[in-house]
Image (spheres, helix red, strand yellow):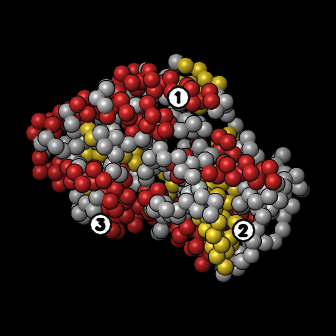
Amino acid sequence: MTVKVRADGARRSGKGRSRAALMALSGVLALSAVAACGGHDGGGARGGTTGAQGDFKQAPQSDGPLTIWVDATRLAAAKLYQKTHPTVKLNIVSYDGDADGSHYLQTKVSLFNRTRKGWPDVVFSTQNNETSWAVPAGFTAPLNKGLIAQSALSGWAHGAGDPCTVNGTLYCLRNDLAQTVLWYNDSLMKKWGYQVPATWEDYEALGKKVATEHPGYLVGSAGDNFTPEIYMWASKCGANQITGPKAVTVNTTSANCSRMATLLDTLVKNRTMSKSSVFSSDFDKNQAGKILMLPGPSWFGGALFEGTFKTPKGQVAVAPMPQWSGDPTPTVGNVGGGTWLLSAHSAHLKAATDFLTWVTTANDYQGQVAPGYPAYAPAAKVWLANQASSHYYANDIAAPLQAAAGQVWSGWGYGQFSQESIWAATVTPGMTGGKPIVSLLPAWQKAIVNYARSDGYQVKVGP
């Protein structure tokens, strides 16, 4: 086995995205290849024989090593596949995973398209919006047109394939989900005689009560760039409803948006809603031990409470995300979850598809090793059983996580522009400076419109 190091430097945008997958990424900015055998130019240009995928033309197929690009967290998956499939020749390349929306993958594919060589066979990305550029660029292969059987694809959680689907064609596989739930301190809730809120109205009321009875304790955080994905998305705020490959409707001043912004403003003002990032040293030092409740994604349990905060075993519990009273359709947000793309230029489609299927469905990885909630439902059951066997949580987390997996609101789209970057640039500074979030909604809308138009989207403003 030889090792190659390429000092290309995967540039990160610095918008501050933090999640379980990203915690292991610090310092991984250069490409390092763990080569099982030889080099690989990515399979050459397209335009070879016509395959079983309709108008998808396969590149000429050949033997040779399979090139896999992964982030630091998924490096374990690639190595496990190599261990369990010793006859398969792999080039494993570690890159930033497009963390923080770095666009590293898009930049490299653009270069490969010009030089007509260099494409990897399979790529993992921490982003859910890669198809917005990868499909027009001709990079990612259609998976549901003969490469992967529909019987296999039916195993994914409801809605998990939405970020990967363009005009009815599936162009990537979802690795993990990041559905939001309500994390809470079970010990404190019982000690203080509080009921876990089922509605946002009750959540706000409890926040007011905590401000009076237990000042300093928190019911949430509004200080992260993914705040809109936790709160606004769950509230069915139409900030970016993608209506076509290059079309979006933006409406951030609707009642669904303003009601959540008003709730956040109330709790920020009485200091039960933190203005610090949950991944900041300030939060870890001064506020992590004061959490009563914290709405957030499925990966908060392992990444934050068990990993960063070192919350003792038996305290953290999970409940369903609160819902607005009278709303008959439960909805939640989503913060992350990765995707796997298969190159349309691959000269090793069979081997690439075998790897792609294994890494997203195999219990050996997804059920036993993967840090996040698997998007493939059968593997998720195994993953949940493993969480239960650890006895870390104060309750059975399976039911609320499984329910939330199918409740991610479909009205929040996956555009090429980053909602996290936009929120960080327009809302966070104003909020930390003392302005009400509800007063910043028009500025948020204007920024989304500008970003979308700069990316070539046709924008409709309003309902």
Mark 3 or mark 2, which has the lower sequence index? 2
Image quadrant of residue 347?
bottom right
Q: Which residue is mark 1?
A: 448
Mark 3, secondary structure of its residue? loop
Residue count near mark 2 (Cα–Cα under 10 Å), binned few <14, some 14–19, many ≥20 = many
Q: Residue at x 84, y 46 (%)?
A: 55
Q: CA distance from mark 1 to mark 3?
A: 43 Å
Mark 1 or mark 3, which has the lower sequence index? 3
Residue count near mark 3 (Cα–Cα under 10 Å), binned few <14, some 14–19, many ≥20 = few
Q: Quick check: marks 1 and 2 in contact, CB under 8 Å? A: no
Q: CA distance from mark 3 to mark 2?
A: 39 Å
**Can residue 288 be seen?**
yes
In the image, taking residue 348 as reference, residue 371 lies left or right, namely left
Residue type of the residue flagged with mark 3 = His
Q: Which residue is mark 2?
A: 66
Q: Is residue 203 above or below residue 386?
A: above
Mark 1, secondary structure of its residue? helix
Residue type of the residue flagged with mark 1 = Ile
Q: Position of residue 297 (x, y in %)?
A: 40, 48
Q: Which residue is mark 3?
A: 391
> Foreground: 192 or 32?
32
